[in-house]
Image (spheres, rainbow, N blue to C red):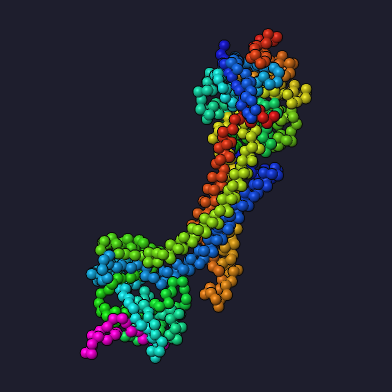
Amino acid sequence: MRFETFVALRYLATSRRRAHVALIATFSVAGLAVGVAALVVSLALLSGFQDRIRRQMMDRTAHLRVSPARGARLEEAPRVRKVLQALPGIRRVSPAIEGRAWASDATGSTGFPVHYRIAAEPPGGAGEARITGAMAARLHAGPGDEIRLVSSRTRLSPIGPVPVAAVVTVGEIRRGSALDKPGEIEVSEETARLLAQWPAGAGAYEALLQDPTAAETAAALVAGELGAAYRVETWRELNGPLAFALRLEKTVIFLTVGLVILVAALSIVANIALTVVEKKRDLGVFTSMGAAPVSLQRIYLTLGAAIGALGTGTGLLVGVGLSLALDRFRLVPLPSDVYLLSHVPFAVHPREVAVIAVFALAMALGAAILPARAAARLAPGEAIRLSR
Amino acid sequence: MTLAIRAQGLSKTYTGEGAPVTVFSGLSFDVPEGRLVAVMGPSGVGKSTLLHLVGGIDRPDSGRVEVLGSSLEDMTPRQRARFRNDNIGFVFQFHHLLPEFTAEENVAFPHRIAGVPEREARRKAEDLLARVGLSGRGDHGARALSGGEQQRVAIARALARDPRVLLADEPTGNLDAASAQGVFDLIREQHRERGMTTVVVTHNPDLAARCDRLFVMSREGIFPSSGLPERG
């Protein structure tokens, strides 16, 4: 063990003998531990909810979307399809066709405008559709009931242009989620082509991947193959505003709860400054034995790091343990008739825990810099002379 | 005759909260290599300050200090620290042992500062404690030792790196007559055994009389006393 570490750890270990230093040291360690634990639990709570939203994004959005950089129609639809199908880990490629329609129940008594599109995952057979819970309620429709869709497009008939209509069966009703758009209906490719009067080609192509987290790599591959004439977007980009809001939410929580750590760091400054004053004579004696000023500085930086490590370690243990327990034993229940979840979910992400640990340790070390520099600048002769 | 310590034109003024206090001005002090030198003088004339300047733990406002032929002024703080660790040992009046550490740990510090591995440093400290008559007391805390024993540990600590210059600032000033005698005997014994240059600041004329040479320090400066025959 280095001389500086040895001295710093001994100062920390024996601080309990010095009541005033011990009190401040306890506050420093406890404050840091509370701050770290609070940050871990807060981020675990956010992650618990955000992970669900992200999973829904991955489930309900195409993982890749290729559209023309200009215009509304893909010029080389077969080539785009071929490039997408050749991707490693591809699960499904489908054209993106969407439009507006008027939905009504089988009797035609209830009607309202909807936005139809081809489902990323087929809703069932060719004539089936996936609707939201809200739409099902408005149409008084359940699984197996028929819905009539009248497109905004028309087709020519002997009596002139007539609206295009299709009857679909409710194959699936989605349970409510943050990503649901109430007026959206997912239909099969055949129904969408009929309603859009678009028998071939597509405005865009969408793809599902086995591993949605590899979407960026896949997008880079596709963009490289197809060139600048096409826009390639990942599910993260397609949900950009929501993803940004989630990131922002986490950043704001990190910064606000992180203030507790800042306050704890200030008490570390007080603790180390007090130790420097109290151990002024020791600094002079160490200098007389040949310790360089940088060594004296290191003693107090190590002391700050040790307090930081103790507080951070305790905080991480408490925070991670509490988060895991809250999630595992579902200790925060939610009324199931109001929420879709039966309990508040907590998810501990190792990367976030590492960021918190580094942040807390950096704050503790940063807090030690000022008093440590003061220790290095101390006149050793004076320290010895005045401590008689 | 080679000089172990050569201090020329030293001035030192302390500027604290009150008015500046000039301790001495234009002071010169030479000590030949291998001598045991005593410095006597009334309190407040700057005897301790002189030792601090010679040992490089304080800087003069003007003047030069050369120890073993090396100018302390020409060294960086890091070089000065290294030089002190290798060549200079300090003994203080109030022993200044570090209370959080055992006697052995206190004595091992100079080695550990020099980067000697912990185990070897401890072994050397144990040997040295045995040589100053404190065998088996290494694991005692500094507070658990008597005044005389504490000063012996402080001497062992000062000798840890086998220094060529030992600076002792009133090493017996805080001890009863018997302990003071024992501590001074130890310093003299180690001085002879190791061939060091030793400067002892003391108020005790009997102990000073047992040194090779006596300097008397006053407001006017530091002068060799004619009262003692030069020995060695």
Q: Is residue B96 magenta?
A: no
Position above or below: B39 against B131: above
Q: Residue A98: where, in percent of width, then height? A: 32, 76
Quadrant for the C terminus of chain A, please: top right
Residue B35, given in percent of the width and then of the height, sits at: 63, 15
Magenta-colored span: A143-164
Q: Would residue A136 be visible to someone looking at this image? A: yes
Residue closest to the eye, B60 or B2: B60
**Secondary structure mainly formed by the magenta segment:** strand
Residue B127 makes an appearance in the image: no
Q: Residue most toward the left?
A: A158
Q: Position of residue B163 (x, y in %)?
A: 60, 24
* Residue B183 appears left or right of A328: right
Q: Residue at x 34, y 65 (%)?
A: A233
Most extreme residue toward the right is B177
Q: Residue at x 68, y 31 (%)?
A: A387
Q: Is residue B231 above or below residue A136?
A: above
Residue B105: percent from the left, percent from the top?
65, 35
Which residue is found at the position 55% from the left and 32% from the top?
Answer: A292
**Image quadrant of residue A124?**
bottom left
Q: Residue furthest front?
A: B19
Location of residue B72 by image quarter: top right
- Quarter the N terminus of chain A occupies: top right
Tell whether B56 sits left or right of B170.
left
Q: Between A372 and B82, which is closer to the camera in this rendering?
A: A372
Compared with residue B140, is residue A29 higher up or lower down, i.e. above or below? Answer: below
Q: Is residue B51 or residue A317 the one in the foreground?
A: B51
* Residue shown at 34% from the left, 78% from the top: A100
> Vertically, is A260 above or below B169?
below
Q: Nearer the viewer, residue A98 or B30?
A: A98
